[in-house]
Amino acid sequence: MAYIPEEISQISDSHPSYIPASDDERERLTILLHKRLDQIIDQEQQTGLSRQDRERLAVMHMQIRADLAAIRYGATERTVREIERRYRVGR
């Protein structure tokens, strides 16, 4: 099991696999995820949703929030690419 520091300040900039994503990339992806989160919240508010749909939306809601947190706390280029793939974001 890998050690994950609790704070981004504990991650070494010299670590070879830690390549921070650019501010522009993180900002662009953050905006997109906030739009997706707004859509999910709107869908969650609809009446007549089945239990399965509510659960599916709740999982998506939590995943988007987790991805936003990952970006906010210093996502690497690799993490940004994984998030983009998850949401099928093109450049």
Image (cartoon, rainbow, N blue to C red):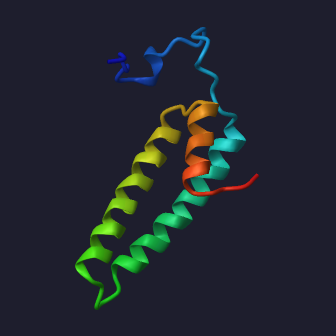
Q: Nearer the viewer, residue 65 or 63?
A: 63
Residue reaching furthest to the top: 14
Q: Is residue 44 above or below residue 71?
A: below
Which quarter of the figure is the N terminus placed in? top left
Quarter of image, res 41: bottom left
Residue sitting at x 46%, y 18%: 9
Q: Is residue 91 above or below residue 35?
A: above
x, y (%) of residue 13?
A: 59, 13
x, y (%) of residue 10?
A: 43, 15
x, y (%) of residue 16?
A: 61, 12
Residue sitting at x 47%, y 47%: 67
Quarter of image, res 56: bottom left
Q: How many marks?
A: 0
x, y (%) of residue 5?
A: 37, 19
Residue sitting at x 57%, y 57%: 87
Residue reaching furthest to the right: 91
Residue sitting at x 63%, y 41%: 81
Residue reaching furthest to the left: 51
Q: Is residue 54 above or below residue 22?
A: below
Quarter of image, res 58: bottom left
